Image (cartoon, rainbow, N blue to C red):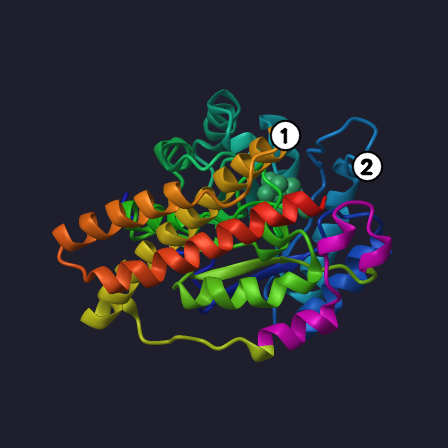
Amino acid sequence: MNDIKPIFSECSEPLYIAGPCSAESRNQLLTTARDIAAAGVKVLRAGVWKPRTKPGSFEGIGREALAWLREAKEEYGLSVITEVATPEHLEYALEAGVDGVWIGARTTTNPFATQQVADALRGVDTAVIVKNPVIPDVDLWVGAIERIYNSGVRRIAAVHRGFGTHQTSQYRNAPHWSVPIELHRRIPALQILSDPSHIGGRRDLVAQLSQQALNLGFSGLMIECHNCPEEALSDAAQQITPATLRDIIGSLKLRRTPVESNVLGDYRAHIDSIDSRIIELLAERMDVAREIGRYKQQHAMAVVQHDRYNELLESAEARAEFMGLSRSFINQIYSAVHEESVRQQLEIEKK
Ligand code: PEP
Ligand code: MN
């Protein structure tokens, strides 16, 4: 798939896509579009059909809202994109003159649904963005991209929007950075954007998640932005105003030296990917520690079991030495890990 092209070649990188979770009214969409364009963003996103977790939630205005996207495009010179989940959505969206579509996380998770959209894309020249599947399965993500590619579309990008999780964490969707990094390794020509809004689920996390994505070498960002976020009919907690969007874009530090042109970049990308794995493993380890904490609490057992800790330390040090690492280095790391584990187990005791 090395002939995949940038989705909007007229836009420089980082590519910023912004707009409301949902197009709610003509006034909401056009006001937001105007202010987003003034912030320098060239691509407007807006959901017309919304996949909602629970029935009864706002499921989007539907076809009627496509006319507002068209107006935003004509009035402010923006490229406009929307989510499609069925061939019918695609037909209506293309008819309304959208410049691209995205396949949502839930659709990417379902190969039947993705294939139906891919079949309907045959012979169509449009930009297609494939959001990651809800589960952190890189093969499923690559498979969805392949389905679109096999239909003949070449302007394809991916959006990393985090992965569903049952674990309690500060994020709405766990980032699992190693997954998009692996996707990039497998399809280097693909632009990968990050969606800090759906990862964080909270507007105060958007800036830091955006910077983290750019630090890791992502090609751009898709950010939810609403003229009046508190009143949004979907995803209210994570949307930011166009003014905040402008501030965030203005404060992002760009890393302009292309990774391909420099050996250091390659090493760093590798290190970043390893570090992501380490962090994910530590998070997983803490989840297990908390489970153990709950078990100990239920069985009236003390949190710290010294024999167990000494055994663990001795075996970790021996293994580390065998791998060419110093015992004291591993000792320091394990002390920190163990301390955190104990702290987390004590938190459970307090609840
Ligand atoms: C969205 O972009 O508003 C959306 C529904 O995204 P996702 O498919 O990532 O949940
Ligand atoms: Mn949303």
| Residue located at (23% from left, 52% from top) | 317
Residue 97 appears anywhere in the view = no
* Residue 48 image position (x, y, % from top left): 72, 41
Does 125 appear above or below 106?
A: below
The circle on residue 37 is none
Question: Magenta span covers which residues?
Answer: 229-249
Alpha-carbon neighbours of circle 2 within 10 Å: few (<14), some, or many (≥20)? some
**Majority secondary structure in the magenta region:** helix
Residue type for callout 2: Phe
Above or below, comparing residue 142 to residue 343 in the picture: above
Q: From the top left corner, tell me how far across and down residue 134 is, in percent.
A: 53, 35
The residue positioned 45% from the left and 76% from the top of the image is 254
Say which of 315 and 12 sits in front. Answer: 315
Instruction: Look at mark 2 in the image and give the residue it sits on.
Output: 58
Residue, disc 1 = 298
- Asked if the magenta segment contains residue 317, the reply would be no
Mark 1: secondary structure: helix
Name the residue type under label 1. Gln
From the top left corner, tell me how far across and down residue 308 is, in percent.
38, 41
Find out whether residue 231 is within the magenta segment.
yes
